[in-house]
Image (cartoon, rainbow, N blue to C red):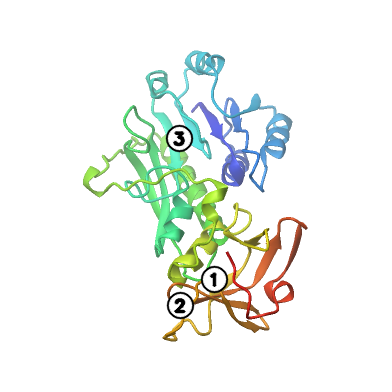
Amino acid sequence: MRFGFIGGTPRGFTLFTELLANHYRPEFCVILKEDDHENTKISGEFLDFAEKSSIPSGIKKKLEEKDYEMIKELALDFIIVCGWRTLIRPEINNYLKIGLVAAHDSLLPKYRGFAPLNWAIINGEKKTGVTLFIINDGETDSGDIILQEEVPVPENEYASDVYKRVIDATISLYLQFLGNVASGQPVKRGKQNESEATYTCKRSPEDGQINWNGPSENIYNLIRALAYPYSGAFFFHSGKKYEVRTAGLGLQNSKNFAGRIPGKIISITDNGIEVMCGKGTVLIGEIYDESAATIASANQVFKSITIKLQ
């Protein structure tokens, strides 16, 4: 069984180390170069580990022509694609016995596209999952499904908490797939139900600004979905940008306010500040002051109920 590895992010790196620990050794490793705004950068450590394991490796954002030529010459069974963000030409499947076996952070055909885990939490989903599928020449994430595993999304957890279970599910699925291939079992594939497909668009850091006019549940979900190490949900006050690290629904969330000013601080508690939303309230706990590069409880920064956040 001969295969290659294309990927990155903490999930891809953890998967890579688990593959080697289970004596599955790729012929090469192409490692994702992170975007500048990302808080977590693992590619350097990833490269060091691969090189110490004597696996030909390199860091880049997209495959180059020489990479395609190498793949054609290697006559591989398949390539694992995990934590990769740019297009891989699907015709490379013609040079692989099984194909490009990718992991997507959703229960396909739901949430095809970018940042599916974050979008699932933003939308208040109670579960997500991981899907192993074959990259094809159709639209993004539309290839045949090999294996799937559900991952719960508790309403009090952040994306980083759910991501840990996504990593575990990814490793479990790939080890199952590799075990099946190693034992000579045929790889079962199932077509996706196009009538059930949903899609996501690419997120940028500036998309995380909180709209206090929205319902408290939506704001809380946005905070959970984007909290560190992701780019963060944020607000402004007096020209300063504050990123929210922890939050919850407010103690007065269920009150029926006849007078409502979204963004207004309505109480200061031992756990933070309670902020009025278009519907309900949100309790803001820990915040990051971007200008000072400091983390503090919101009740240490904002100490008046006359303050309105933007």
Identified by mark 1, the residue type is: Gly
Per the rendering, the mark at residue 263 is 1
What's the residue at 42%, 21% (across, down)? Answer: 92
Identified by mark 2, the residue type is: Gly
What's the residue at 72%, 39% (across, down)? Answer: 45
- Residue under numbered circle 3: 182
Identified by mark 3, the residue type is: Ala
Residue 22 visible? The answer is no
Residue 242 visible? The answer is yes
* C-alpha distance separating marks 3 and 1: 57 Å
Per the rendering, the mark at residue 280 is 2
Q: Earlier in the sequence, mark 3 or mark 1?
A: 3
Q: Quadrant of residue 43?
A: top right
Classify residue 279 as left or right of residue 299. Answer: left
Q: Quadrant of residue 77?
A: top left
Mark 1 packing: few (<14 Cα in 10 Å), some, or many (20+)? many
Relative to 55, residue 212 above or below: below
What's the residue at 68%, 83% (across, down)? Answer: 270
SS for dot 3 = helix
Residue 58 position within the rendered picture, expressed as x and y whole percent measured from the top left? 65, 26
Q: Earlier in the sequence, mark 3 or mark 2?
A: 3
Between marks 3 and 2 in the image, the one whose residue lies nearer the viewer: 2
Between marks 3 and 1 in the image, the one whose residue lies nearer the viewer: 1
